[in-house]
Each structure stands twice: as structure tokens, then as C-alpha cells.
Image (cartoon, rainbow, N blue to C red):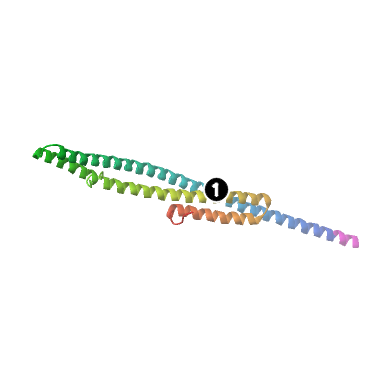
């Protein structure tokens, strides 16, 4: 009788241990599935943020080239303007005073003034400088956005590594850190899109 009870007790303990082990395995599998979903979401966000960074980088380069072209045009207009004014002064000083000389000098000075400001075409020095500064502002904003996207992508990459390590090591804390870094990466990405110049790092 005693041996039968002992056998039953051992059987119950073994069954209980088996049940606990099965529950533990199910819990671990469920946790790993959740972490796998987290990794997938982080990877998708990383792809989106990297695409945003690439776009911002291209915008920055394009605006910089356009600004440089505008400043070069501005410089050319400045040289022409100075040359015409100098020629008008030289003509008036060297040639005998006459209506023809005065008329020619006035024409050159009028052209020089047009080079300084020409609102109709938007190609005077004043208008070119305004356009160039606008392109520089666009370049700087895009560059700030690029940096925000870079920080966001870095945070997401580290988050993916930590989440993967959490699956391998079974350390749940790593997945929480990964989630926090993922949130930080998203925050940087949103700053890149919505307010790239809000903070400077």
C-alpha cells in the first residue's frame, strides 16, 4: 500500500513538473513571438527612416548646388555691374563732353543698375541673393533632418540587435531596452520629418 502511494506521489510530481515545463516552454515561445514581432516592426521603421534620411540628403545636396549656382550668377552680375560703372566713369573722364558721351555713360549706368536689381526677371543681384539665401536655408533644414534620421536609424539598429540578443539569451530586460531605443528612434524620425531644426546635437 505504501509503495503504491509513493508511486502515485512520484507520478503526480512528475506530471506536475511536466506540466510546469510545458507551460514554461509555451510562455517562452509566446514571448519569443512577441519579440520577433517587435524586431519586424523595428526593421520596417528602420527602412522608412533610412529612406527619409536618403531623401533629406539628396535635398540637401541639390539645394547646395542650386545655392552655389545662384551665388556664381550673383558674382558674375556684380563683376559686370562694376565693369560698366567703371567704363562709364572712364568714358566721361577721357572723352570730350558731348551729348553722345553723356548718353552712352547713362546707358551703361542704367544697365549696371538693372544688374543690381531686376524684379521683372528675378535675375538682379538683389533677387539672386534672396534666392541663394532661400536655397541655403532649405539646404540647412534638409541637413538637420538628415542628422535626425541618422540618429533615429542608429537607435533602431541597436534596438534590433538587443531584441535579437534577448531571444538568444532569454534576458527579457534586453527586449525592454530595445523597445525604449525603438521609441527613441521613432522620436528622432518624427523630428526629421516635422521639426528637424528643433534640437541641435
For label 1, the crowd category at 10 Å Cα-Cα, with few meaning under 14, some 14 to 19 and many 20 or more, is some
Whether residue 41 is visible, yes or no, is no
* Residue span colored magenta: 2-7
Q: Residue at x 51, y 50 (%)?
A: 151
Residue at the extreme top of the image, as rendered: 95
Is any atom of residue 171 visible in this view?
Answer: yes
Magenta span includes 123 = no
In terms of depth relative to the viewer, which is nearer, 22 or 91? 91
Name the residue nearer the viewer: 82 or 45.
82
Q: Is residue 156 above or below residue 1?
A: above
Residue occupying the point 29% across, 43% down: 74
Magenta stretch, overall SS: helix
Residue with the mark numbered 1:
43
Q: Position of residue 171 (x, y in %)?
A: 67, 54
| Of residues 59 and 190, the one drawn nearer to the viewer in this rendering | 59
Q: Give the image quarter of residue 1.
A: bottom right
Amino acid at each position: 500500500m505504501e509503495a503504491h502511494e509513493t508511486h502515485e506521489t512520484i507520478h503526480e510530481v512528475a506530471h506536475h513538473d511536466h506540466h510546469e515545463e510545458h507551460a514554461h516552454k509555451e510562455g517562452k515561445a509566446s514571448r519569443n513571438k512577441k519579440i520577433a514581432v517587435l524586431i519586424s516592426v523595428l526593421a520596417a521603421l528602420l527602412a522608412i527612416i533610412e529612406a527619409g534620411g536618403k531623401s533629406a540628403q539628396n535635398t540637401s545636396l541639390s539645394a547646395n548646388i542650386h545655392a552655389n549656382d545662384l551665388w556664381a550668377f550673383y558674382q558674375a552680375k556684380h563683376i559686370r555691374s562694376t565693369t560698366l560703372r567703371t567704363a562709364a566713369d572712364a568714358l566721361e573722364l577721357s572723352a570730350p563732353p558731348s551729348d553722345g558721351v553723356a548718353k552712352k555713360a547713362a546707358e551703361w549706368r542704367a544697365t549696371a543698375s538693372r544688374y543690381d536689381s531686376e524684379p521683372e526677371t528675378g535675375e538682379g543681384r538683389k533677387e539672386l541673393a534672396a534666392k541663394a539665401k532661400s536655397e541655403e536655408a532649405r539646404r540647412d533644414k534638409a541637413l538637420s533632418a538628415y542628422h535626425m534620421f541618422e540618429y533615429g536609424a542608429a537607435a533602431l539598429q541597436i534596438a534590433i540587435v538587443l531584441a535579437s540578443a534577448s531571444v538568444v539569451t532569454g534576458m527579457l530586460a534586453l527586449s525592454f531596452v530595445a523597445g525604449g531605443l525603438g521609441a527613441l528612434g521613432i522620436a528622432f524620425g518624427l523630428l526629421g520629418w516635422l521639426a528637424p531644426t528643433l534640437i541641435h546635437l
